[in-house]
Image (spheres, rainbow, N blue to C red):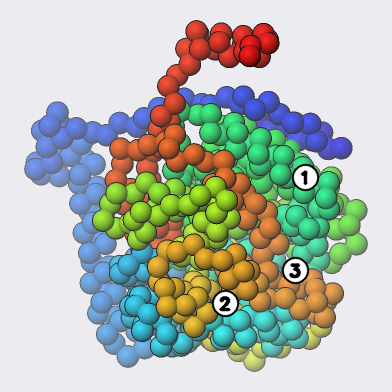
Amino acid sequence: KLELVDRKKNVTTGKGMASDEETLLPSTAGTAADPSKSGGCCQPCTDCYKNSFCCRCCTWCGACSLVVFLLLGIWVLMGIPGGRYIPVGANTVTLGYGVDMLSLLSSKGVPGYPDAWCGGNSIDDLASCRVKENFPGPDTTSYMAWDDVWRIGSQYPAKEWSGEWWRGNELGFIINNPKFWNVGIDPLSIALGIMPKQHAAIRPIMEDMWNLAKMGDKGRDEAVEIIRRRLKSFFQRETISVPTDVKVLVHQILNEVGLKRNVSEEYAQAFVSLQTQVVAMATVSQLIPSMLVGITLNSISSQVQEYVKEYIPLVEALYGEQLAKEDCSPSKNCTVQAAAAVWDALYAAGGLSVPGTISTGLGVLYSTDGTNPAPGAAYDKHEAMQFYWENIRYFPPVVGFPHWSTRPTCAGSNAEDTARLNKTDGKTETCPLGKPSWLTGYPTVNQYLGGVRRVPNLAVAMWDPRKWGDNSNEFVLRPLGDYDNFSVGFAEMVVDQDVADGRMNRVCPGKSLALLIGSSFFEEFNQSQWTTSDSVAWKSTTPFVGEFTLSSRAPALGSFGVLLLVLQVVLPFN
């Protein structure tokens, strides 16, 4: 029984349950300068010292001018031979990759992925969509057809273990900034891109934490109780801020299920704030030059480090004896490696995907905006699982599942020596890390140049009419068997029990828990009891649905109402 208390962060660890009546912190709305009270922004910037609002305007005007200048420069560079290969940012991703990733923001439709990869979202577009070369980025090939995605994905365990394929610090098509994984692990990578022997070492731990089948009947019953109790408390509030409050809820559930501790709403709100920053900086941070990395990312990176440090004793208490038998070198040890993977699960995997797909479900139910891709969507209580599944299919939280047939050349090395690092029997080695750069705070890393990237597109495969039928581009509740048989959204095809005793499987270890949380949410949710005055707009990429607030229709009980409820419990009314 684990009993650790972190009062500073409002955390209680252990089997005992915390009170459902956790403090909801009041929020203080920020204030914006009012140009009408400051004389406007039309004054010369030389008068800034007289007018603080003008100073803000001058700063933003200067920033906008810089952005326009950079965009013009990019437009020119992209037109010259080899322009897409120009390295940008501290980690030498290519200009073509950055431009292509940012272009997804302007794709048409909700989601915009069929448009970006297939040229449109009609059934004809989807039925003819198989391969797209040099997108996103040069020397990247995307595979959209369901059959190809399944075939390629099923080879991952064997190909990685043999050293033929390599995986990097990537989440879907996004190449993550190593700055956020400078936490005592090597390589500086999300768990999806660590070395094969490291993955084999901590995979059983991730399954024990998040896989209902691994928990046994008792563990599953406890998880069900936690989810139901949390939801009951959640729906007693007067307002639900989507998606923030949903993220907070899921973070609390995951902590209680996986880490065997209760965290307060205040604690979860602080985590969600950092999570939002890390997600927002995913692609953009790769374009930041080395000289600005420290200024722009040090604060975020330091906060990530603090969370990983917080998880280390929790993981040690739960799994330390088991992890001590494993080898995660050159990382400090397997406990640190697993603690970093816990961060990954809470910030990106279940901690982001589950609230994201719950939020789209709420969005389609309430959106009156013309951008709503599923106006009139509805479900009955017994269809809660189908409704949640359709949100996963239609609004896929994970877009791609990449690998490199030729890994990027290690910084300071050459292609031949880099290739020699790929070895059989799970013994592939990391690129040697040099000394931390005084500009970035971490060793120099090359994440793209010299590499050849292959990416099965899970998102478009979840729309493939060859599996999902002629209405695959519509939000329609489907038989549960279709989701079980055709989903690739959890990387279901990446399973091979003959490789490292199944420890190289990449199917999401928390799939069953995610489905339980999502379906339970919509079973407990009563649409008629909530309303919103927001139109709820949509966009082409994750998180797809805009922010909105639901308000409870239930009237406040007041003191007289509370008294009646008490009397009904105490007295034998018939």
Quarter holding residue 253: top right
Which residue matches tag 2?
402
Q: Are marks 1 and 3 in contact (CB under 8 Å)?
A: no
CA–CA distance in space, label 1 to label 2: 35 Å
Residue nearest the observer in this picture, 127 or 295: 127
Sooner in the amino-acid sequence: mark 3 or mark 2: 3
On-image quarter of the N terminus: top right
Picture residue at 33% right of the left edge, 81% below the top: 119
Quarter holding residue 32: top left
CA–CA distance in space, label 1 to label 3: 28 Å
User: Pointer 1: residues within 10 angstroms few (<14), some, or many (20+)?
Assistant: few
On-image quarter of the C terminus: top right
In the rendering, at what x and y percent does residue 336 appear? 75, 55
Sooner in the amino-acid sequence: mark 1 or mark 3: 3
Which residue matches tag 3?
199
Taking the image as drawn, is residue 117 in sight? no
Judged from the image, the secondary structure of the residue bearing numbered disc 1 is helix
**Residue type marked 1:** Asp
31 relative position to 358: left or right: left
In the rendering, at what x and y percent does residue 388 appear? 54, 56
**Residue type marked 2:** Pro
What count of labels does the image hold?
3
User: Pointer 3: residues within 10 angstroms few (<14), some, or many (20+)?
Assistant: many
**Residue type marked 3:** His
- Of badges 1 and 2, the one in the foreground is 1
On residue 221, the disc is 1
553 relative position to 271: left or right: left
Image position of 152 with respect to 494: above or below: below
User: Pointer 2: residues within 10 angstroms few (<14), some, or many (20+)?
Assistant: many
Image position of 283 with respect to 502: above or below: above
In the rendering, at what x and y percent does residue 62 appear? 22, 53
